[in-house]
């Protein structure tokens, strides 16, 4: 699961500008595997089993390093809780340290997840690419989206062996369905990621530039970007299409 967090001119961030992070999240293992049950008939206690494997860890960590190398990213930070989860977190960290040896051109460090959350809020500029386990990746990617304007600007990609799915991190947003107020930029940026994955980089860059231009102008943005002066979902999409149709 690949989740970028990037600032766009025209979106008010709480503290930061020019953020460009990518979070690589393992999303087939650990506590989201659905292996859980009540341990007594009265349902007074429950148990969830989080399994982390060497194969699953190596797959996501190697993908992160290969992506960083291909796209000339400078640094990978591995996030874990190996100080407490000595076997599962320790395994993930051990695999990361081994894979890192194969990519000397990419800087590597690691942080405990609670410290990582604090550091991302205090100084996100120290990070570039972040790779972590399922639960931590889910939480930290939402934190990262908050740094750049919220989930309306957060696309995601699920990359498998020969299969890829692209989406908005916020999902279907049922709480605002049918109100014509959702920001479609996350879905559009998911399409940009899809085009990049397919090798259509120029087309993807053109769409991303059109989105960026509309937001930077500030006159036609959705409610999550400007609560005082905003347009609807359809109108924002139309504005991006109009921008795309302009000659280069």
Image (spheres, rainbow, N blue to C red):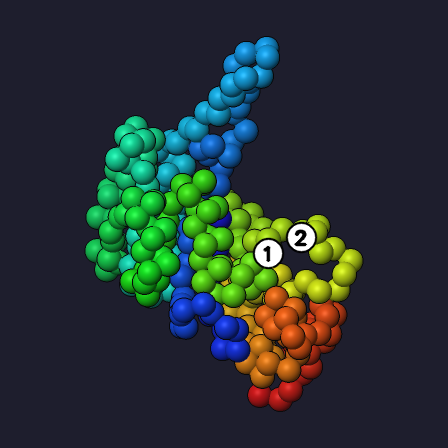
Rendered position, 172 above or below 216: above
Residue reaching furthest to the right: 178
**Residue 116 in the image, given as x and y percentages of width and height:** 33, 50
Residue 95 seen from this side:
no
Q: Around disc 1, counting alpha carbons within 10 Å, would you say few (fewer than 14), some (14 to 19), or many (20 or more)?
A: many
Which residue lies at the image location 53% right of the left edge and 53% below the top edge? 157
Q: Quadrant of residue 203?
A: bottom right
In this view of the protein, which residue sits in the foreground, 179 or 44? Answer: 44
Which residue lies at the image location 76% right of the left edge and 61% below the top edge? 179
**Residue 114 in the image, given as x and y percentages of width and height:** 34, 45
SS at badge 1: strand
125 vs 153, left or right, is left
Q: Which residue is mark 2?
A: 173
**Which mark is in front, 1 or 2?**
2
Contact between labelled residues 2 and 1, with CB atoms less than 8 Å apart: yes
Residue 76 seen from this side:
yes
State the quadrant of the C terminus.
bottom right
Which residue lies at the image location 51% right of the left edge and 70% below the top edge? 201
Residue reaching furthest to the bottom: 247
Q: Which residue is mark 1?
A: 168
Rendered position, 153 above or below 161: below
**Residue 219 in the image, given as x and y percentages of width and height:** 64, 82
SS at badge 2: loop
Q: Earlier in the sequence, mark 1 or mark 2?
A: 1
Question: In the drawing, what numbered circle is on residue 234?
Answer: none
Gap between marks 1 and 2 measured at Cα:
10 Å
Q: Around disc 2, counting alpha carbons within 10 Å, would you say few (fewer than 14), some (14 to 19), or many (20 or more)?
A: few
């Amino acid at each position: 699961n690949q989740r970028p967090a990037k600032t766009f001119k025209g979106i008010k961030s709480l503290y930061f500008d020019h953020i460009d992070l990518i979070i690589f999240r393992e999303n087939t293992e650990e506590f989201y595997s659905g292996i859980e049950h009540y341990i007594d008939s009265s349902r007074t206690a429950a148990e969830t089993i989080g399994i982390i494997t060497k194969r699953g860890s190596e797959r996501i960590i190697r993908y992160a390093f290969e992506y960083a190398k291909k796209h000339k990213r400078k640094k990978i930070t591995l996030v874990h809780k190996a100080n407490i989860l000595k076997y599962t977190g320790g395994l993930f960290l051990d695999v990361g340290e081994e894979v890192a040896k194969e990519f000397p051109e990419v800087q590597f460090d690691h942080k405990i997840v609670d410290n990582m959350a604090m550091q991302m809020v205090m100084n996100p500029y120290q990070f570039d690419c972040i790779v972590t386990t399922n639960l931590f990746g889910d939480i930290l990617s939402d934190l990262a989206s908050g740094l750049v304007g919220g989930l309306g600007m957060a696309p995601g990609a699920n990359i498998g062996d020969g299969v890829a799915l692209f989406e908005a991190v916020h999902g279907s947003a049922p709480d605002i369905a049918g109100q014509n107020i959702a920001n479609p930029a996350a879905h559009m940026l998911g399409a940009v990621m899809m085009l990049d994955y397919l090798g259509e980089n120029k087309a993807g860059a053109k769409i991303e530039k059109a989105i960026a231009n509309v937001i930077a102008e500030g006159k036609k943005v959705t409610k999550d970007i400007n609560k005082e002066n905003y347009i609807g979902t359809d109108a924002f999409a139309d504005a991006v299409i109009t921008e795309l149709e302009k000659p280069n």
